[in-house]
Amino acid sequence: MIRRLEKASRESGSRLWAAVANDLSSARKSRREINVHKIDKHTVEGEYVVVPGKVLGDGNMGHKVNVAAYKFTSGAERKIKDAGGKTMGILELIKINPKGNKVRLMG
């Protein structure tokens, strides 16, 4: 996955994918974790978010947000989908938005 992110960064000229690859190449213990309520607090309706780590299910989602992450807990995935959002893998987001325009890096 890291090689694909680096390739996407080179092809598109986007530093976002290079930053995500760098975060994912770190030790598993130091990867980012973020709760659903923080995503809800710092985003607006319809926004795309990438989390180079794990999304946890603490809190509630009040609006539709599309989230790409390395991993989701089942509770986080359910809450995002119940709010009308979409959960996906990071590589899936690269296919949708190869340049990483208007994608918020969180975690």
Image (cartoon, helix red, strand yellow):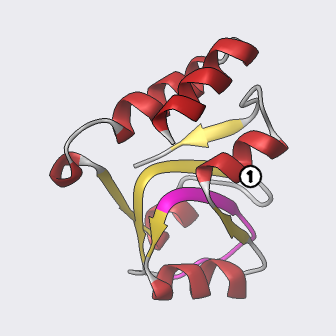
Q: Is residue 21 rendered to the left or right of residue 91? A: left
Q: Quadrant of residue 6?
A: top right
Q: Considering the numbered disc 1 on the image, is that residue within a helix, a strand or a loop?
A: loop
Relative vertical location of residue 64 with respect to residue 32 in this rendering, above or below: below
Q: Which residues are magenta?
A: 60-70
Residue at 61% in and 40% down = 104
Question: Mark 1 belongs to which amino acid?
Answer: Glu
Q: Measured from the top left, where is residue 51 in percent x and y?
A: 49, 51
| Residue on which the image places disc 1 | 47
Residue 68 inside the magenta-drawn segment: yes
Q: Is residue 2 rendered to the left or right of residue 103? A: left
Q: Is residue 101 rendered to the left or right of residue 4? A: right
Residue at 54% in and 53% down = 42
Relative vertical location of residue 72 with respect to residue 50 in this rendering, above or below: below
Residue at 65% in and 47% down = 91
Q: Quadrant of residue 22?
A: top left
Q: Measured from the top left, where is residue 73 in percent x and y?
A: 43, 79
Relative vertical location of residue 74 with respect to residue 26 in this rendering, above or below: below
Q: How many marks?
A: 1
Residue 51 inside the magenta-drawn segment: no
Relative vertical location of residue 74 with respect to residue 56 in this rendering, above or below: below
- Disc 1 crowd rating (10 Å Cα; few below 14, some 14-19, many 20+) is some
Q: Measured from the top left, where is residue 12 in percent x and y?
A: 74, 17
Q: Measured from the top left, where is residue 70 in percent x and y?
A: 47, 57
Residue at 77% in and 31% down = 98
**Of residues 20 and 82, which is closer to you in this image?**
20
